[in-house]
Structure formats: structure tokens, C-alpha cells
Image (tube, rainbow, N blue to C red):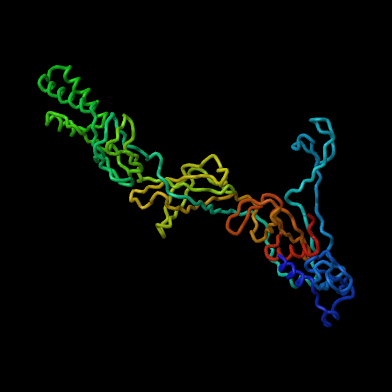
Amino acid sequence: MKILILFSFLLFGCTDHSGHESKTETASEHASHTYYTCSMHPQVRESEPGKCPICHMNLTKVVSQLDDEVPEATKEVSKLYACKDDATITSPSPTICPIDGEEMVEVIKNGAGEVVAKLTLSKTQVTHFDAKVFEVSSMQMTKDVRLLGNVMQAQEKESNIPLRVDGRVEKVYIKSEGEFVKKGDPVVDIYSPTLISAGEEYVIARKQASKEANKKDYRDLLRQSEERLTNWGINENQREQWFSDGEVKRTITIYSPTSGIVTARNAVKGKYFKEGQSLFDLVDLSTVWVEMDVYEVDSALVQNGQDISLRFGALPGKTLKSKLDFVSPVIDPKSRTLKVRATIDNEDGALKIGMVADGSLQVNLNSDDLVVPRSAVVDTGKRKIIWLQTADRKFEAKTILTGHIAGSFIQVIEGLSAGDKIVEKGNFLLDAQAQLFGGYLE
């Protein structure tokens, strides 16, 4: 910034003293005021050359035409009065507060649209000042909201393989977590006295039903026995094998009722399980979730049903399409982000749990809002300022309230009107000039 101020000073502060120009200027134009100042401490002004009393640098000569003297900067401050106990009750003029009956106190209203500095450039300065002016107007802007997240298992696709009857594990067919299990695959052999007794009852009931086919009691007993075994995970082939052998073996194989990838292997040989305890936890990865974070500043722009494009580092050149199907109602207090989620088909298994996803949302903003180029806005950290050209050589700085940024443009919520001519190129030189001559009032 100091280099920019020096450049502005050299650009704007120097005048041409050539003999030819002095002959062509009129007497009124030639009238000038000369003083010496420090480029690092512009508050220092001396009538003669010398050293800066603060930093001891050589003072720089400044020549300004009398008719083009830079006027003192003005700051328009509007007065406002409010109740002592309730600041929401205000009045533009002093009056009595209707709440407590006391006189309202004065507050300062520093909002968007305030003029915080004015500059009038000399004719010499204008010849060196190449400003680019932009006329404020409304425009349809499309904001590209970027999201970063990762692939995770879909919770509705989670399942497990429970033991449906008390028993002890005698053999485990699943070797490790991450193994894919298909529906109908054997998972464990168990020893269960309860299940063995139920199997023997089935064999007896079926033999009796075969001999006494006309008796309803035997048929009902057989049906009840089949239902009990089915509920405990015994399939028809196993029942047929028992009836064919005429007995139930000591160990009974349990088959998987679903398909998925093993995420937890709880079954261990010799371990006793009670009814309902999970032998294996599974997840079906044919469909996965992509959970992403949206920065708080963009959180109001996302909603369910929006189209989203997703890219993955492991799939270069490939873009997957989906829709947002979940938007969290809560901002994370630590990261100040909002969780959103999309569901993607993953039949080929290309997407792995934990993969990083780069998402993009295209959001159309309000086409009635005024927009200006981002380069026209001077952001001081405390406020956003924009320079307007009010005449050929006259400029003023205003504070503005901005909205969303889309590409090279930014929304203006307050502070400007359609048709205003703002300085898009050269605004930082105006800013430096105002700071050099103490043009801003803080």
C-alpha cells in the first residue's frame, strides 16, 4: 500500500514546468500553491524543502493549481435518536420515548451510501489518470457454489446378520472385514440345543403328517414347526436334508439373509450368542452417499432438489450428476459449515468409502439486484468502498453493502443506484490519493 501511495503521489503530485506549457496556460491556470510534504506522513506540510521531522526523509515538492485545490473530504452523517432501553424504537428528530417517557438519546447511523471522501483532480492529474468507468445496472448472475466432501456408506443400506436363536459358534466362514457376502452364502455353523430340538420336532411332525395325511392336527403341527424354523433362519433345503437323513446334525449352518460388505466381524469360534445379537454388520455399497460442507456464507443458497456435479480424484475426467437430498438445518459451530448430501448409484463399485469429492452447484441469483465488477470495490476490512465519478474531474467515495459474488461481479444491496458511474480501473489510485491528503475521515 505504501508503494501504491508513493506511485499515486508521483503520478498526481508532480506538474510539468516546461516553458512551452507555461506560455500557453492562462494567468488563472498558472496560479498555483506550492508546499512540501512527506510521502510517508502526509500530515506534514512545510513551506520550504527539508527533512520530515518524523522519519527524516526528504520532503517532496507538491504543486497544485489554486482553482483545483483538493477540497476537504466530507463525511455525511445522518443523526438518529433511539430509546435508552430499546434501541429498536427510533426517530429522525429528538423526542420523548413512548416506552419510558424519557428523552431519546442520539445515535450515529453509519450505513451504506455514505460519502466518506471527495476528490477533485487537477487538469494535469487528469491527463495522467486513465480511469475506466462502469455504469451500474442489474444483471442475471449465476453463482458457482463449490463444495468439498467425501463418499460414505448410505445408512439406509446398512444391515446385519443376527443370530435368531441362542447358540455357540462352531465355525466362521467369513474370514475378515471388507469381504463381500451374497444372500444365501454360509456365514457360521452353530451349536444350539434349542434349534436341534426344533429340528427334531419338525422331522417327527413331518413323518406323522405323512402317515396321517387326513388329520388336521398333524398338518397344523407341521406348519407351525416349519414357520418356527424359517423364523430362526433355517431354509427349506436344510429341512429337506434333515427329513431325508431322519436326524438333525449337532452343528447347523446359518446362511446370510442379505448381501453386502462386512464392516464388523463379531462372530468368533467358541463365542456364545444370544437371540438377536449380530454376527456380522454389513453395508450395501451399490448406492452411496456423498456428504459435503457448504460455507456459512453460501448456506442460504442451497436447498433440496438442486442439481449437483461431482468429480473425484480417482476418476479423472469423469463427472457424476446427482441431486441434493438432504440439507442439514444446523450450522456446525466449530467449522461454521453446513452439511449437505447427495445419493449416487455405485453398481460398478468405482466409488470407495472415504474418497474425496469435489462438488459444484449452479445457483441463479436475483436478476433485479444491482451488480458491479469486483475490481471496483475497495475492501478496507471495516467497510467496502466504491468510487463514483460525479463530474469530469470530480470523484467521491461511498460505502456500500454487498451481497453474493459470482465470477467477476458482486451484488450491491445498498449504497448505489442504477445508472451510477463507478470507477472500475483507477479506483486504488483515487484511494491512495485520498489517503495521501488525509481525505478519509474515520
What residue occupies the far front of the structure in this picture? 270
Residue 374: % across, % down: 64, 59
Can residue 416 be seen here? no
For image coordinates 43% across by 57% down, the residue present is 313
What residue occupies the far left of the structure in this picture? 211
For image coordinates 80% across by 47% down, the residue present is 78
Q: Quadrant of residue 70?
A: bottom right
Q: Is residue 358 above or below residue 174?
A: below
Q: Is residue 41 above or below residue 212?
A: below
What is the quadrant of the C terminus in the image? bottom right
For image coordinates 34% across by 37% down, the residue present is 160
Of residues 74 and 105, the one drawn nearer to the viewer in this rendering: 105
Residue 178: % across, % down: 33, 47
Q: Quadrant of residue 73?
A: bottom right
What is the quadrant of the N terminus in the image? bottom right
Of residues 32 and 263, the one drawn nearer to the viewer in this rendering: 263
Can residue 208 be seen here? yes
What residue occupies the far bottom of the structure in this picture? 19
Figure label count = 0
Residue 200: % across, % down: 17, 25
